[in-house]
Amino acid sequence: MTVGQLKKSTAYLKKPTFAMLTSLRVLDIPKRLLLLNCLVTAIYTTGVLASLYAAYLTPDLRTAAANSSGLINGLATILLTIFLDPQLGLLTDRAMNDPAQKDQLGRIYGVLMLSRFAGTLLAQLLLVPAAYWIRIIVTWI
């Protein structure tokens, strides 16, 4: 690569548009599926810890708050069952029926595991709001 080629390369750069970003796919996985996988993992990860923190925030109702992790985990289960599992089933079925995609299945699950790791990191941001949400629900009931 020369300096002249580097100068010419700026003519080929283009600012990304929203349409370009929405059409991105990683290993033929829609990115909304990766984001949803990340979100569901974050909600699951937060469930029990948020209920324990809500019990700390409401000492007079600590038993009810500590046992209310189902409020958060129930939401995650609904999201997982309705949106995530059918898509993952279709990806697996497509990979098992197409020999060319069978080799790619391990990489697909690797990318999904990375999105779960990102969901675990996102759970750190959801912990306090989820605990306050549980606190509101427990004091309201």
Image: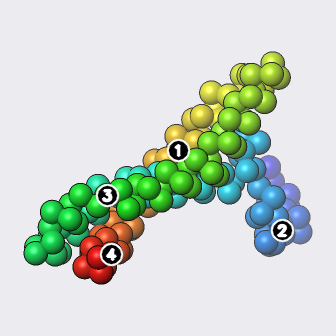
- Frontmost of labels 4 and 2 is 4
Residue at which label 1 appears? 114
Tell me the distance, in whole angstroms, between the alpha carbons under discs 4 and 2: 40 Å
**Residue tagged 4:** 137
| Mark 2–mark 1 CB contact (< 8 Å) | no
Q: Is residue 84 above or below residue 106?
A: below
Q: Which residue is mark 2?
A: 19
Q: Which label's residue is closer to the chain start, 2 or 1?
A: 2
Q: Position of residue 117 (x, y in %)?
A: 46, 47
Earlier residue among tags 4 and 2:
2
Q: Which residue was labeled with disc 3?
A: 69
For marks 1 and 3, the one nearer the N-term is: 3
Which of the pair 98/66 is nearer the observer? 66
Give residue 89's position: percent from left, percent from top: 68, 35
Count neighbours of disc 3 (C-alpha within 10 A) and say few if under 14, some if 14 to 19, many if 20 or more.
many
The kind of residue tagged 1 is Leu
